[in-house]
């Protein structure tokens, strides 16, 4: 596998409240997020969030290289801009590309990055948002806005009140970062946000059907998960 290209994208994150610190204040609560997507010859992409500064100067250090050599590639980026200076904003660009390389390495290993870096299960923090790609635009979906996840053989649909987005992250991997008190697996291919459940109905065949608020979507509950609804 080799790194073949990159794309610089911009999206926005709505915090839902004013944000800021002593260095500045954003009253609308909407901040810009710079994203770099590293492309490979095998179609797998790595995503890094940070700065776009000097990405064009740094990328030649990565082009044609195997993304699994994370430490060596970090050193190559430093070496490439060493004489001109790699501090300040340039170091932000190095950090963004380094994040994208680590993302690639984790995807190739088939494990979440926290596991690849040696973390223990009990220290895993819950996912705060899902990154989805729509055309050339990357969007950040806050986890609270997700109504359910539905998987097929290749993709997972992230369902919100606004519609669906497809991601390639396996459902099993997604579930490692979800709060089990909020997101329940109700079928081998379906995980639902319990806060989005409007009602649960028993069908003529004895199966349970979950209906979601506001979207009219209906989800079947398979037998191994019916016990979750005994108290409802």
Image: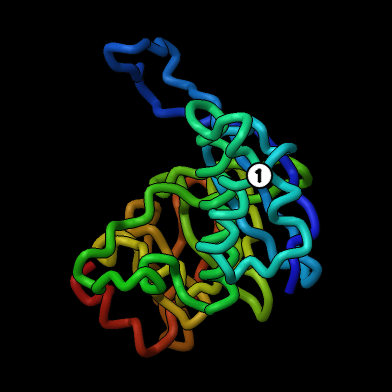
Viewer-nearest residue: 122 or 139: 122
Viewer-nearest residue: 62 or 150: 62
Direction from residue 167 to residue 218 in the image, left or right: left
In the rendering, at what x and y percent does residue 178 appear? Answer: 35, 62
Residue 165 sits above or below residue 10 on the image: below
State the colouring used for the structure image: rainbow
- Residue 125 sits in quarter: bottom left
Residue 68 sits above or below residue 153 on the image: above
Name of the residue lying farthest toward the front = 83
Count every numbered label the image shows and give the total.
1
In the rendering, at what x and y percent does residue 189 appear? Answer: 52, 78
In the rendering, at what x and y percent does residue 66 appear? Answer: 68, 69
Direction from residue 220 to residue 156 in the image, left or right: right
In percent of the image, x 56 and y 43: which residue is there?
Answer: 94
Viewer-nearest residue: 183 or 116: 116
In percent of the image, x 59 and y 75: which residue is there?
Answer: 108
Query: Which quadrant holds the C terminus?
Result: bottom left
Direction from residue 143 to residue 156 in the image, left or right: right
Residue 132 sits above or below residue 187 on the image: above
- Residue 56 sits in quarter: top right
Q: Would residue 159 be seen by someone viewing this image from the given angle?
A: no
In the rendering, at what x and y percent does residue 82 appear? Answer: 58, 38
Direction from residue 207 to residue 163 in the image, left or right: right
In percent of the image, x 61 and y 34: which residue is there?
Answer: 83
- Residue 184 sits in quarter: bottom left
Tell me if mark 1 has few (under 14), some (14-19) or many (20+) residues whose alpha carbon lies within 10 angstroms of its own: some
Report the residue marked by disc 1.
Answer: 80
Q: Would residue 151 be seen by someone viewing this image from the given angle?
A: yes
In percent of the image, x 24 and y 73: which residue is there?
Answer: 120
Query: Which quadrant holds the N terminus?
Result: bottom right
Q: SS of the residue at dot 1? A: helix
């Amino acid at each position: 596998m080799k790194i073949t290209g990159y794309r610089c994208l911009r999206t926005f994150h709505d915090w839902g409240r004013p944000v800021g610190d002593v260095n500045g204040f954003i009253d609308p609560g909407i901040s810009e997020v710079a994203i770099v997507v590293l492309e490979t010859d095998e179609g797998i992409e790595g995503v890094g969030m940070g700065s776009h500064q000097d990405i064009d100067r740094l990328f030649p250090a990565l082009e044609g290289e195997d993304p699994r050599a994370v430490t060596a590639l970090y050193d190559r980026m430093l070496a490439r801009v060493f004489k001109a200076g790699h501090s300040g904003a340039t170091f932000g660009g190095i950090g963004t590309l380094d994040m994208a390389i680590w993302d690639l390495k984790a995807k190739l290993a088939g494990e979440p990055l926290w596991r690849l870096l040696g973390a223990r299960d009990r220290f895993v923090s819950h996912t705060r948002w899902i990154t989805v790609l729509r055309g050339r635009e990357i969007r950040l979906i806050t986890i609270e806005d997700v109504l359910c996840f539905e998987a097929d053989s290749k993709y997972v649909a992230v369902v919100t009140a606004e519609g669906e987005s497809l991601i390639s992250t396996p459902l099993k991997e997604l579930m490692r970062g979800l709060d089990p008190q909020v997101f329940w697996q109700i079928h081998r291919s379906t995980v639902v946000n319990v806060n989005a459940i409007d009602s649960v109905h028993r069908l003529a065949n004895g199966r349970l059907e979950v209906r979601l608020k506001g979207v009219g979507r209906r989800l079947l509950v398979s037998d191994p998960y019916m016990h979750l609804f005994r108290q409802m």
